Image (cartoon, rainbow, N blue to C red):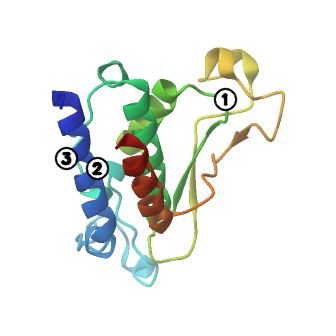
Amino acid sequence: MSTMQRHLEHLIEDIQESAANRDTNANFVVPRPVDIPEHFDHLPFEPTRKAHEWFGLSMDMFPSADKWNERQLLELCVILRQLFEHYNMQVELSNCLPYDIVYTFLLKAMETYTTCRPGSGNVDVISFCAYDSENCPFGDYCAAEDEYSCDTWVLGHHWDGYLDWEERRKNTDS
């Protein structure tokens, strides 16, 4: 078994542990900033952290896309999308992106996104697209012309369904 495959298996275990600990990871105490006037005390205070901090994961765990093969990138993209969904976040990407670009944008979302409301029932959409084909972050894969192509990349199942997908993957690998 290659070093990267072993790393992938450990990374998947860490991601699954993050999902299992969602309520613990998302419920932390942050002191209210002192510069907020008292008359705003009745408003809920939403602390900000980067998504990877909400997940309890370090960005150092994720090598660049060129370190993975196509199959490993697919697995990482699927499980990371599942993790975002599990924390009530949807990452909006062009549907036609290659997996290395999807992976790169998922890591970018983990590093830049700061809101998390896992128990609220609201879904936070993380979008990189401004529907401007001249300045599109997806380059040649821009979906600005087709409003339905830049979507939340629905996988057809949620976190619990990943276990079925993983089982099917193991059965095809043997």
Are there few (<14), some (14-19), or many (20+) residues within 10 Å of tag 2?
some
Circle 1 crowding by C-alpha within 10 Å: few under 14, some 14–19, many from 20: some
Q: Which quadrant: the C terminus?
A: top left
Amino acid found under the numbered disc labelled 2 = Ile
Q: Nearer the viewer, mark 1 or mark 3?
A: 3
Element type at marker 1?
Answer: loop
Q: Badge 3 local density, few (<14 within 10 Å), some, or many (20+)?
A: few
Horizontal arrangement in the rendering, residue 123 relative to residue 133 (left or right):
left
- Residues at badges 3 and 2 in contact (C-beta under 8 Å)? yes
Q: How many numbered circles are shown?
A: 3
In the rendered image, residue 103, in percent from the top left (x then y), is placed at: 44, 33
| Percent of width and height locating residue 1 | 18, 32
Q: Give the residue number, with chain letter if any, for mark 3.
A: 10
Kindly identify the amino acid type of the residue bearing the numbered disc 3: His
| Front-most of residues 4 and 96 | 4
Tell me, yes or no, if residue 126 can be seen here: yes
User: Would you say residue 114 is visible in this rendering?
Assistant: no
Instruction: Identify the residue shown where x is 58% and y is 35%.
Output: 128
Residue 56 quadrant = bottom left
Quickly name the residue at label 1: 96
Left or right: residue 159 versus residue 93 is left
Q: Which labelled disc corresponds to residue 12?
A: 2
Q: What element carries label 2?
A: helix
Q: Which amino acid does label 1 sit on?
A: Cys
**Structural distance between the alpha carbons of marks 1 and 3:** 28 Å
Note whether 87 is above or below 71 in the view shown. Answer: below
142 or 38: which is nearer to us?
A: 142
Mark number, residue 60: none
Q: How far apart are marks 3 and 2 (CA)?
A: 5 Å
Looking at the image, is mark 1 or mark 3 earlier in the sequence?
3
Name the quadrant containing residue 148.
Answer: top right
